[in-house]
Amino acid sequence: MKLGDSVTVHMDAPRSAVWELVSDVTRIGEFSPETFEGEWLDGATGPAVGARFRGHVKRNGRGPVYWSPAFVTACVPGEEFAFSVGKPDKKPMIAWGYRLADAPGGGTDVTEYFELAPRLPMKIYWALMGWSRGRTNREGMRTTLERIRAVVEATG
């Protein structure tokens, strides 16, 4: 059983331009339907492996509202930006990320994904609620990517 999912959207823009948006957590509120603001922590000012940040989340667009800590786990400019939710000294339960690839006809194919930790509590959760939360996450990822596409293609 796969504990996660992904959505890919084509953007008529170079990977470098897309990278600037997906790796800037301070702009997440422009794109995400659930996370309405983000801020770097501990003096971090941009993406780097190990950098900590937090996102202000409104779960399912309705609530509850809470701050969620996270830390960068992959940071390859123009290729991948990923992070785990939680604190680096704890085993994270979920990871999120973006992979960027050159599209055959030009532009960039951008994949947003999430992966739940393959631990028993998450396996049980996914078996019982995965159909519902998975749909919500897919719709949210598509919305996020479509909003990013609108910005990156408009600034061309």
Image (tube, rainbow, N blue to C red):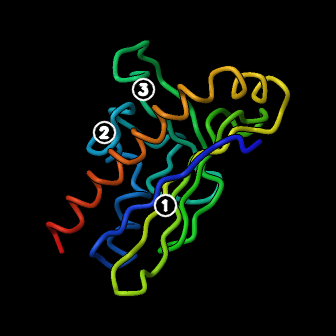
**Rendering coords of residue 61 (x, y %):** 34, 23
Question: What is the distance, in whole Å, between disc 2 and disc 3 at their CAs?
Answer: 9 Å
Q: Spot the residue most to the left.
A: 154
Residue shown at 53%/65% (left/top)? Answer: 99
Question: What is the distance, in whole Å, between disc 1 and disc 2 at their CAs?
Answer: 19 Å
Of the 4 image quadrants, the one containing the N terminus is: top right
Question: In terms of sequence position, does the residue under pointer 1 or pointer 2 come before the other?
Answer: 2
Of the 4 image quadrants, the one containing the C terminus is: bottom left
User: Identity of the amino acid at label 3?
Assistant: Val
- Horizontal side of 67 relative to 5 (left or right) equals left
- Horizontal side of 115 relative to 78 (left or right) equals right
For numbered disc 3, what is the local secondary structure? Answer: strand
**Rendering coords of residue 144 (x, y %):** 35, 47
For numbered disc 2, what is the local secondary structure? Answer: helix
For residue 111, the mark is: 1
Q: Is residue 87 above or below residue 60?
A: below
Question: What is the distance, in whole Å, between disc 1 and disc 3 at their CAs?
Answer: 21 Å
For residue 29, the mark is: 2
Residue shown at 21%/59% (left/top)? Answer: 151
Q: How many marks?
A: 3
